[in-house]
Image: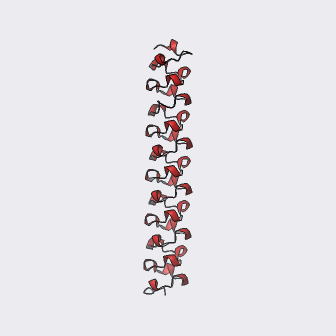
Amino acid sequence: MVSSCCGSVCSEEGCGQGCCQPSCCQTTCCRTTCCRPSCCVSSCCRPCCISSCCRPSCCVSSCCRPSCCRPSCCVSSCCRPSCCVSSCCRPQCCQSLCCQPTCCRPSCCISSCCRPSCCRPSCCVSSCCRPSCCVSSCCRPSCCQSVCCQPTCCRPSCCISSCCRPSCCVSSCCRPTCCQSTCCRPACSSCSCC
């Protein structure tokens, strides 16, 4: 179709490659034949959810598909499981529905994503030191705080003064750094702490 049809007459027949211009980017022309950057506007963000239209103007819930999960579309409107891929693991998408292993990276290690599915070494930082992440994979010095002083994290890497509490007084933590009165229990009687 020639450009003469790319005016107010945006009919179904005129939705060809030659008419993919902003003047014809309406609902009637939202077809795959017009999925080009010139028509990537909000009115055409449904059948055009392909890589050529992955731009902020089309970052709406109807286009939150893996084909458009690019940094330019990593906004709150596209923070859904279908777009929880590594390219969208950014703070603005670190919500509870994107807390899965594909987004377990430092940029998403915030309180809203401190869930067991993301308790990996890359997210073992102070912002995620909470009981839901006190698992063996996160028992590191960076998370050895009072909130994580529980039996699931009683391992040598967390046997420091901040975690020398009764809940962690086990044989694995019987070391000089934990020689405190709170840890003088039978579990540590064979060590040099009691």
Q: Nearer the viewer, residue 15 or 192?
A: 15
Which quarter of the figure is the N terminus placed in? top left
Q: Residue at x 44, y 40 (%)?
A: 66
Q: Residue at x 54, y 82 (%)?
A: 182
Residue 123 sits above or below residue 67 on the image: below
Q: Position of residue 146 (x, y in %)?
A: 56, 70
Q: How many marks?
A: 0
What coloring was used for the rendering?
Answer: secondary structure
Q: Residue at x 53, y 25 (%)?
A: 27
Residue 140 sits above or below residue 52 on the image: below
Q: Nearer the viewer, residue 120 or 113?
A: 113
Q: Position of residue 70 (x, y in %)?
A: 48, 40
Q: Position of residue 80 (x, y in %)?
A: 50, 45
Q: Nearer the viewer, residue 11 or 148?
A: 11
Q: Position of residue 44 (x, y in %)?
A: 52, 28
